[in-house]
Image (cartoon, rainbow, N blue to C red):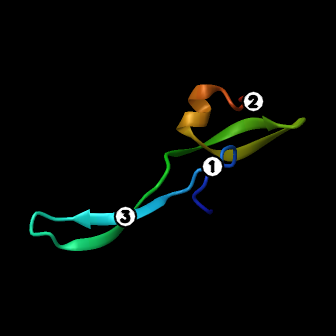
Amino acid sequence: MAKHCEICGKVGIVGSSVSHAHNITKRRWEPNLQRVKAKVGKEVKKIWVCTRCLRSGKIEKA
C-alpha cells in the first residue's frame, strides 16, 4: 500500500529528527489514513482516506 490519501492525494513528508546533542537523523511524517467503505461512483469500495477528508465530508460513507 502506498501511503497516500485516495481523495486528496496527501502523502508523507521527509525531515530531520534533531536530538539535544544535535545529532540529525532522517525521519518521515505519515498522513493519518483510515480504511473506510465509501461510495465510489455506484460501487462500494474500501479506500484509504485521510482524516481531514473524512471530517470535511469529501466522501460518502457506505
Q: How crowded is mark 1: few (under 14 residues within 10 Å), some or many (20 or more)?
A: many
Instruction: Mark 2 vs mark 3: give the one in front.
Output: 3
Q: Which of the marked residues, 2 or 1, is nearer the chain's N terminus?
A: 1
Q: Could you say where residue 60 lies in the image, as x and y percent from the top left? A: 73, 28
How many angstroms separate mark 2 from mark 3 (CA)?
36 Å
Q: Quadrant of residue 26?
A: bottom left
Task: Indicate whether 58 appears above or below 15.
Answer: above
Residue drawn 17% across the image and 73% down it: 23
Say whether residue 46 is left or right of residue 23: right
How many angstroms separate mark 3 from mark 1 (CA)?
20 Å
Report the residue marked by disc 1.
Answer: 5
Report the residue marked by disc 3.
Answer: 15
Question: Hey, what amino acid is under mark 2?
Answer: Ala
8 or 2, nearer to the observer? 8
In terms of secondary structure, where does tag 1 sit?
A: loop
Task: Indicate whether 56 appears above or below 52.
Answer: above
Q: Which of the marked residues, 3 or 1, is nearer the chain's N terminus?
A: 1
Mark number, residue 62:
2
Q: How crowded is mark 3: few (under 14 residues within 10 Å), some or many (20 or more)?
A: few
Q: In which quarter of the image is the C terminus?
A: top right
